[in-house]
Image: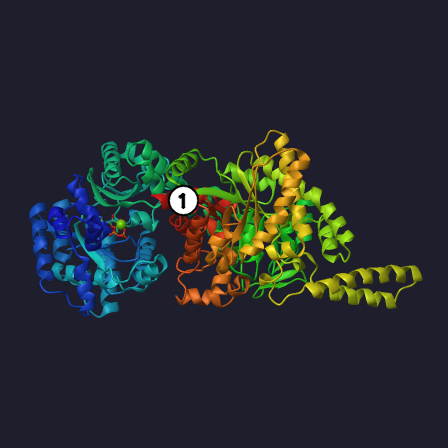
Amino acid sequence: FSELDQAMAYVNDDWSALRGLFGGKGANLADMHRIGVPVPPGFTVTTEACNAYLAGGGVFPDDMWDQELHALMAIEEMTGKTFGDGDNPLLVSCRSGAKFSMPGMMDTVLNIGLNDETAKGLIAHTQDPRFVYDAYRRLIQMFGAVVMGIPDEAFETAIEQAKRKAGVATDAELNAQDWEALTQQFKTIFRSRTQVDFPQDPVEQLKMATEAVFKSWNGKRAVDYRNAAGIAHDLGTAVNIVTMVFGNMGDDSATGVAMTRNGATGEPKIEGDYLINAQGEDVVAGIRMTKDIDALATDMPAAYQELQTIATKLEQHYRDMQDIEFTIEKGKLWMLQTRDGKRTAHAAVRIAVDMEEEGLITKAEAVARVAPDQIDFFLHHQFDTKAIAEAHNAGQLLARGLNVSPGAAFGVVAFDADLAESWAKEQGKPVIMVRPETKPDDVHGMLAAKGILTSRGGRTSHAALVARQFGKPAVVGVSALTIDLNKRRMSVGDRVVLEGDWLSLDGNTGEVFTGQLKTMVPDIRDPWLIKLLGWADEIRTLGVWANADYPADAQRAREYGAQGIGLCRSEHMFFESERLPFIQQMIMATLPIERREALKALLPFQREDFAGLFREMDGLPVIIRLIDPPLHEFLPDLVELINELADLKMRVQHAGNLAEVDHLLQQIRTKERIRAQAERLREQNPMLGLRGVRLGIQIPELTIMQVRAIFEAACEVTREEITVLPKVMIPLTSHANELKVQRAVLEAEAKKVMAEQGITIDYKFGTMIELPRAALTADRIAEYAQFFSFGTNDLTQTTFGISRDDAESGFLMGYINHDILPDNPFATLDRDGVGELMRIAVAKGRRTRADLECGICGEHGGDPASIALCHELGLDYVSCSPFRVPIARLAAAHAAL
Ligand code: ADP
Ligand code: MG
Ligand code: MG
């Protein structure tokens, strides 16, 4: 470890390359030695040697073994002990250590160098036969397991029997004779399992252990771990040979692990566990009750003080929280490992902020250290980690699905929106709404529910979008789940859940549990988070706006730091029960007067909705998108209608009196009209049909009413001395002429309202860019649009020609699993295709109108990778669900770093 400088020269002073060569453990051991932290003498066999060994079919590369023996001699010199010496033997550990930490995935053998002869020497030297035989049996046990593949139970059973025979409960109570007997027994077990004797030659032990550690790189556990963690398979592991120090040499010896700060809360206080008179893995193995590190201050004050000093020194050196392993041998502290510590999202934020304030790192570094997605943990309820573990043990896991909207929720199962709403609102029950999939007219139930579960649908299914929009935990696409809406029950295999039963959803993992799991309440007002996001705001250049349809969403968006509303979907308000009849009447109208009446009834509702948004967003821009979906979405489902009609006709046959017949016939006539209209409106490809600007051109009265509502609301709120900045957005433009025609009509109405009210509003008219043709002809479109907003959901659908709703539960996932597509393009913007269209649109649009404001309001606006692309494309802002605003603020800062 003392030759780090030469090693650094070999890798041209590249620390990351050194970690690649020495592994993280080896590099840090040498590094600790360099800065004066006590590390037992040792050396590292490089990953290059490991890779050569594996590539050569299990032969050490030229010269490697000689070099290893040579290094061992250097250690003998430093320690004054000799490997295999009968008087004062050197013992070493042989430890794996790869570039990226793979905790517990590979192997380590302790106490190498012990045999019958050196054991006697060590006893003479230490006067402690109990310690020596405990160490010796551990060597046989670990060597047996790691090198020869003997299952650990074989040895553990023997220990259990010995304890029973001695009449004691713990390992610690076994005495020297017991361990000596066990050592003999272990040798017998070793022989009977492997047909060979435990090797007495220390050099042979070291050679075999080195080979075993090399091979452990390709062990199944390690391969699985790398697959899951996305670590390359060709890195190889280094092998660290480290002089043994002993935590099991009596009551002035100990071994432990610690974090230099609290890994759960980030509190700047060392936390950890230790054991007196124990060795290495006893602490993590959980065979003895460990002590809290605080107690070390009284048990061994000097060693504790030194540990504190070293912890601080390591943090100063690595500029991050460290996870350390240490051993105290007869009062002397030794460090055996250090690495950056794992931490929760809360701890990550607090540690980053604290370290900036301690002067250890810069603001930019603090911001860079927290992953945007970690912010999610501050926004949603989470299950207690203990509760999750217990639920797993209790067999409560019912199924797994897609984790589309984070957070945890529990409640009673309701199979339809109306029931979910009435249970929640009237009886105050927490409800989990369960459906095969959801539709726009389920929204009221979804809003009332605590969580949403569907058996079908993908990451951008209706259920997923709405859930994320409203911050509801949701799990969708649980294909193992069979829902029987008639019998009001669902099942997974032979396990049945009835309506009204308790269910818990984990939107972070996609797990669905039966019963009620304990949750923890998060808090966005965490002072460290507020500070960190403030620094992110100083760094980022991209604006962050929010998609919000209702005043309550707008309020939340603002509280979370949104700088505007990038999308208000005006038609969402039509789905509310008191409005739906009017919109249906408007659709059904055959005479102009009927249509006008229906629209007149809708106007005050819309005006109030918009006024509410404007009040919340005082001084900030609000983009309102005019009606977008095809009209049939507002009509009842055709199949349902036909069933209802059949039912009514049946009842006419059996009616008891003429009044009843009359009544039924009238109902039939109304329903027939609706059915005829629904059939007339039915389209083969509704998403490519009569919607967006096309609808506005076809039925101008509708969008004119919406514009009137916007401007009447704007005038009303302006009179309250609130600053209103409305922006009217026209969806689905494909040709500049569409915009030309529609804007002329709408702007005329806007001017008319302002004249009537005698108030001038600062407004803009713009369009969504969500069709490839619009992107390609953006220069023409910009003649009529004062702003662009990329509707990347539709733009992705139409660029790929893939129907999102169908594909996500179908072939698209196969494409991703087989690497035909790198990512789901509906979750992360497709840089080469959709991104290229956006690039063209921004460039062409700004050629016509230099100050053209460009933003994005699709789902991608809340996805960190997509936000980075938006930054690169020079957009002015991203707009996302209020719950993703804090995430987007941080992601935008990362993009600017
Ligand atoms: P892992 O990567 O699984 O933690 P390690 O190589 O770090 O494996 O070792 C396992 C255990 O043995 C740790 O508790 C470590 O501190 C301890 N250990 C390793 N080498 C020595 C040594 N030379 N002296 C004392 N304890 C050691
Ligand atoms: Mg370790
Ligand atoms: Mg769209």
Q: Does the residue tagged 1 have its C-beta within 8 Å of any atom of ligand 3?
A: no
Does residue 578 appear in the picture of this structure?
A: no
Q: Nearest the camera: 741 or 125?
A: 741
Image location (x, y in percent) of residue 891: 40, 45
Q: Nearest the camera: 662 or 279?
A: 662
Image location (x, y in percent) of residue 51: 20, 63
- Left or right: 885 as drawn, with respect to 701: left
Q: Nearest the camera: 880 or 727?
A: 727
| Residue under the image location 52 percent in, 60 percent down | 458
Looking at the image, residue 758 lies above or below residue 399: above
Q: Residues within 10 Å of mark 1 (few under 14, many from 20)?
A: many
Q: Nearest the camera: 326 or 338?
A: 338
- Left or right: 765 as drawn, with respect to 633: left
Coloration of the structure image: rainbow
- Left or right: 703 as drawn, with respect to 245: right
Element marked by disc 1: helix
Does residue 839 appear in the picture of this structure?
A: yes
| Circle 1 residue | 892
Query: At label 1, which amino acid type do we have?
Result: Ala
Q: Residue furthest top?
A: 721
| Residue under the image location 43 percent in, 33 percent down | 527
Quarter of the figure that contains the C terminus? top left
Image-quadrant location for residue 324: top left
Image location (x, y in percent) of residue 452: 58, 53
